[in-house]
Amino acid sequence: MVDRLKMALLSHSCSHSLRLNIYISSLEHYVRSCLSSLTFAHRFLSIQITTALRTRFVNDIYSVILSDSSRLSRMSDNNPVKNDVQNFDRKCLKKTNTAEKNTLPTKEDIEQEKKATQGSK
């Protein structure tokens, strides 16, 4: 845009070329300073917006975690099944004799099977 304006002004009147060059250079400087300040402002606002969004996200997550943890603690305190299990008297249980139905093979049995499979090969 600045280049087109510069070319138009230069082609319009050659007699005032020195004044036009000064005017155009000052205009270019002004436009560049405006653009740089806009870029700086844009970066600054972008950083502020990003920080605000992150802060809000962290605060939202923190509130969700706090509400969940408080709800879980309330649920665990009022849970009758958990209280019954914790307060159960183990002395009431009868002792039983358990027999294993499927016993594991001994080392000797495993070695015999290995020898038998190696001998058949």
Image (cartoon, helix red, strand yellow):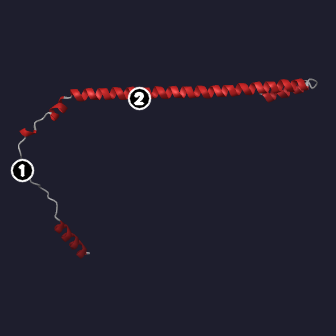
Residue 82 picture quarter:
top left
Mark carried by residue 61 = 2
Q: Amino acid at mark 1?
A: Asn
100 or 78: nearer the viewer:
78
Q: Amino acid at mark 2?
A: Ile
Q: Quadrant of the C terminus?
A: bottom left
The residue beneath circle 1 is 97
- Looking at the picture, does residue 112 appear above or below residue 50? below
120 or 106: nearer the viewer:
106
Q: Earlier in the sequence, mark 2 or mark 1?
A: 2
Residue 10 picture quarter:
top right
Residue 23's spot in the image, x, y percent? 84, 23
Q: Is residue 120 left or right of residue 55?
A: left
Name the residue at the right extreme.
Answer: 15
Residue 111's spot in the image, x, y percent? 20, 70
Q: Residue at x 25, y 27 (%)?
A: 75
Cα–Cα gap, marks 2 and 1: 53 Å
Q: Quadrant of the N terminus?
A: top right
Residue 43's spot in the image, x, y percent? 61, 29
Q: Few, some or many C-alpha atoms within 10 Å of disc 2 (few <14, some 14-19, many ≥20)? A: few
Q: Residue at x 83, y 25 (%)?
A: 24
